[in-house]
Amino acid sequence: MKGFFKKNETLISILFIVIYLVVNSIFLNKFGMYDWQTMAVNIGLSLLIILFIIIFKLGNYFGLTKFPKPKKFLYFIPLIILMSINLWGGVRIENSVLEIVFYMISMIFVGFLEEIIFRGFLFRMMAKDNLKSAIIVTSLTFGVGHIINLLNGSSFIPTLIQIIYATATGYLFAVILVKGKSLWPCIITHSVVNALSVFAVDNSFTAVVSPLCLTIIPICYALYLNKRIN
């Protein structure tokens, strides 16, 4: 089974990426992020990929292994800071309890899916030939991939800002995967940031400070890890 995957890794990776982007766009446009159907499709896609990974025994290959030693990674304090960033400007509750639950669960699985797709399938597919290219391309792809938000009604400038800090965060996640051999810190951080965005307050503070922190912290942390860990 593993041999089949290796022979068709590029095709399988592209197929999963396309399925995720197309299916999520359809459901987001039709139902939005607060609907149970969007949550159900993200859970379903996650279970499909988990089943695929189990059948083909790709857990270690994709970095689904134990956490790296916390001391080497500054006890992941920069990641903890990033996870709390959506609460810095205050907390807003504008949706019903069920809508918030559907949103948070859906976004947790979106975090898992995007990490497996970008730092799992796409990264591993490229890293076989050139590690540096894999880091650069997956970081840029992760950032530019957020342009899909324009199709879901977002404005141009906020989307552009999101692309910038998502690229920086994507670079950090790639470095963590390479240095720590584990994807779990990336999955957890990504999922928590996504889930807590339901409480984020839109004001001048969050419009300026949050994007800056989401750009500067990942870059500084990634540079530290590059220098500190062989």
Image (cartoon, helix red, strand yellow):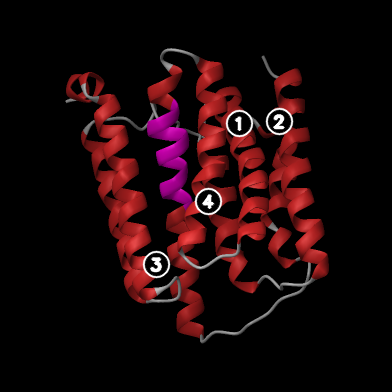
- The amino acid type of the residue labelled 1 equals Ile
- Comparing labels 4 and 2, the label whose residue is closer to the camera: 4
Indicate whether 225 appears above or below 130. below
Location of mark 1 (residue): 176
- The amino acid type of the residue labelled 2 equals Ala
Mark 1 residue element: helix
**Label located before the other in sequence (2 or 3):** 3
**Crowd band around label 1 with a 10 angstrom C-alpha radius: few (<14), some (14–19), many (20+):** many
Q: Is residue 63 visible?
A: yes
- The amino acid type of the residue labelled 4 equals His
Location of mark 4 (residue): 146
Residue extent of the magenta highlight: 111-123
**Label located before the other in sequence (3 or 4):** 3
**Crowd band around label 3 with a 10 angstrom C-alpha radius: few (<14), some (14–19), many (20+):** some
- Mark linked to residue 198: none
**Residue 199 x %, y %:** 64, 73
Task: Tell me the distance, in whole angstroms, between the alpha carbons under discs 2 and 3.
Answer: 32 Å
**Crowd band around label 2 with a 10 angstrom C-alpha radius: few (<14), some (14–19), many (20+):** many
Task: Tell me the distance, in whole angstroms, between the alpha carbons under discs 4 and 1.
Answer: 21 Å
**Label located before the other in sequence (4 or 1):** 4
- Comparing labels 1 and 3, the label whose residue is closer to the camera: 3
| Residue 61 included in the magenta stretch of the image | no
Task: Tell me the distance, in whole angstroms, between the alpha carbons under discs 1 and 2.
Answer: 8 Å
Location of mark 2 (residue): 222
Task: Tell me the distance, in whole angstroms, between the alpha carbons under discs 4 and 2.
Answer: 21 Å
State left or right for residue 195 relative to residue 158: left
Residue name at image x 61 percent, y 59 percent: 156
Location of mark 3 (residue): 28
Predominant SS along the magenta part: helix
Task: Tell me the distance, in whole angstroms, between the alpha carbons under discs 1 and 3.
Answer: 30 Å
